[in-house]
Image (tube, rainbow, N blue to C red):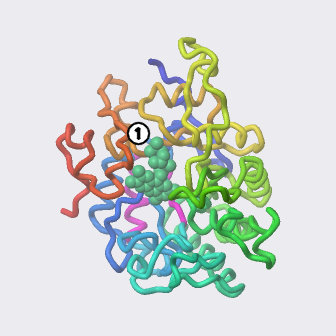
């Protein structure tokens, strides 16, 4: 299939142009050690995967030591982490893509083993994890300052797009969701209060970046039933699509240049009816977006900045159809690029090289736990990114 839109450039603000609409989204590869510094495994991974992409957003990189989601996560909380990150930004730029980085804090979705001993912090107590401390006002201020300091380091390292992680049940989502934010102060309660943290982080990161980098937020627009099912007969209301879209609008007004749409911690119920005519050649009639990708259409209708849509895209044809059907201005391909690191290079290469398709393993992608078992990588005869 022809993919004219996917391969067309997109102008972003600040005179930056992406050469095409293909995004490598943040994908943690669990290769750092206690230092949280970059090593050869990271460099090799981005060197292999970035060619062909218009934009690469480096994996979730923690802005604070207690915000690590895993003991092997990259960090951007100390200056000594800058040189390695500079090498990665250079690797991505040399591959022809705009280098972006995701700034992350896990909030209460971690533990003291993963944080190498630092006490995890969350908007409200987590009954099943007594070691997690509720954030005091000063902690919140300090974490906002950590995001700003991380933004400064990221710019110094050469990244040109700074993506705030506001999705997937991590700290930004924890503040937004009434399920995990039970505060009664100015950081909880009304939507305006629950989104205050992300608003302040956005303002702080935009101010730190100035015109040296663009700022994006990966925003969890809505959440589905609680992970693990929740208590029967007592379905706690989660973040709704209306609240998510309104938050997207407010964050854009606060200075964002790009919105990267995702879920807020669990897969939401589909918001669109099935396609009217699955046999039609019109993508709006026939394309079947997954429930997460569906969330990007109402956001795109509500904001004026470019929207990145993600989830469930396996082939270039899927990506072209998603663009044509209005699910984003840019399309990110996550597991597809882990399955075949040559995904973007092959799609843009023009010589018909077949991609090794991600088969969307259930219940979970092996790249979370055991990348050696990824069926596509096995067929390609490559293992996980290695330290050479
Ligand atoms: C192994 C793995 C690591 C991921 N790491 C991140 C991450 O660092 N930050 C993030 O926002 N999302 C992360 N994600 C989510 C992906 O970026 C993407 O949104 C998700 O996989 C859905 O897109 P896909 O269907 O194209 O894979 C990860 C997903 C996988 C499978």
Residue where numbered disc 1 is placed: 52
For image coordinates 62% across by 61% down, the residue present is 166
* Foreground residue among 111 and 212: 111
Q: Position of residue 99 (x, y in %)?
A: 49, 55
Report the number of discs.
1
Query: Is residue 1 rendered magenta in the image?
Result: no
Vertical comparison of 125 with 368: above or below: below
Give the residue displayed 45% in from the left and 70% down from the top: 69
Task: Say which quarter of the image contains residue 168.
Answer: bottom right
Q: Is residue 171 above or below residue 121?
A: above
Q: Element under label 1?
A: loop
Above or below, 79 relative to 249: below
Question: Residue 303 location, x and y as percent?
Answer: 76, 44
Q: Is residue 58 visible?
A: no
Question: Which of 46/282 is in front?
Answer: 282
User: Image height check: is 118 above or below 178?
Assistant: below
Magenta segment: does it hold 97?
Answer: yes
Placement of the C terminus among the 4 image quadrants: bottom left
Q: In the rendered image, which quarter contains the N terminus?
A: top left
Query: Where is residue 340 shown, x and y percent of the image?
Result: 31, 40
- The region drawn magenta spans 84-103
In the rendered structure, the answer to whether residue 346 lies left or right of residue 240 reads left
Position of residue 3 measured from the top left corner of the image (x, y, whole percent): 49, 24
On whether ligand 1 comes within 8 Å of the CB at mark 1, the answer is no
Residue at x 82%, y 65% (from the top left corner): 190
Q: Nearer the viewer, residue 17 or 63?
A: 63
Q: Is residue 44 visible?
A: yes
């Amino acid at each position: 299939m022809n993919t004219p839109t996917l391969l067309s450039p997109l102008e972003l603000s600040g005179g930056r142009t992406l050469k095409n609409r293909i995004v490598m989204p943040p994908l943690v590869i669990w290769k750092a050690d206690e230092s949280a510094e970059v090593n050869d495994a990271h460099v090799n991974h981005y060197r292999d995967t970035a060619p062909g992409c218009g934009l690469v957003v480096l994996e979730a990189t923690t802005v604070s030591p207690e915000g690590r989601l895993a003991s092997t996560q990259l960090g951007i909380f100390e200056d000594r982490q800058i040189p390695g990150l500079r090498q990665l930004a250079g690797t991505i730029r040399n591959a022809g893509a705009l280098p972006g980085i995701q700034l992350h804090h896990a909030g209460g979705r971690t533990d003291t083993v993963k944080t190498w001993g630092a006490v995890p912090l969350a908007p409200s107590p987590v009954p099943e994890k007594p070691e997690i401390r509720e954030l005091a006002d000063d902690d919140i201020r300090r974490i906002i300052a950590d995001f700003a300091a991380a933004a400064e380091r990221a710019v110094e390292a050469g990244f040109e797009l700074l993506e705030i992680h506001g999705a997937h049940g991590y700290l930004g989502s924890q503040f937004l969701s009434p399920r995990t934010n039970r505060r009664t102060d100015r950081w909880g309660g009304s939507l305006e209060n629950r989104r205050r943290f992300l608003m302040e982080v956005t303002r702080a990161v935009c101010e730190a970046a100035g015109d040296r980098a663009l700022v994006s937020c990966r925003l969890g627009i809505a959440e589905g039933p609680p992970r693990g099912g929740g208590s029967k007969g007592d379905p706690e209301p989660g973040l709704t699509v209306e609240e998510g879209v309104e938050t997207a609008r407010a964050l854009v007004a606060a200075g964002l240049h790009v919105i990267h749409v995702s879920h807020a911690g669990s897969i939401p119920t589909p918001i669109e009816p099935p396609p009217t005519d699955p046999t039609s050649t019109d993508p709006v009639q026939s394309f079947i977006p997954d429930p997460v990708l569906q969330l990007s259409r109402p956001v795109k209708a509500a904001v004026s900045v470019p929207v990145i849509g993600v989830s469930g895209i396996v082939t270039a044809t899927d990506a072209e159809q998603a663009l044509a059907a209005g699910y984003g201005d840019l399309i990110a391909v996550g597991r597809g690029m882990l399955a075949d690191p040559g995904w973007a290079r092959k799609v843009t290469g023009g010589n018909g090289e077949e991609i090794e398709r991600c088969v969307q393993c259930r219940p979970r992608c092996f790249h979370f736990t055991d990348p050696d078992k990824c069926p596509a990588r096995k067929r390609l005869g490559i293992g996980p990114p290695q330290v050479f």
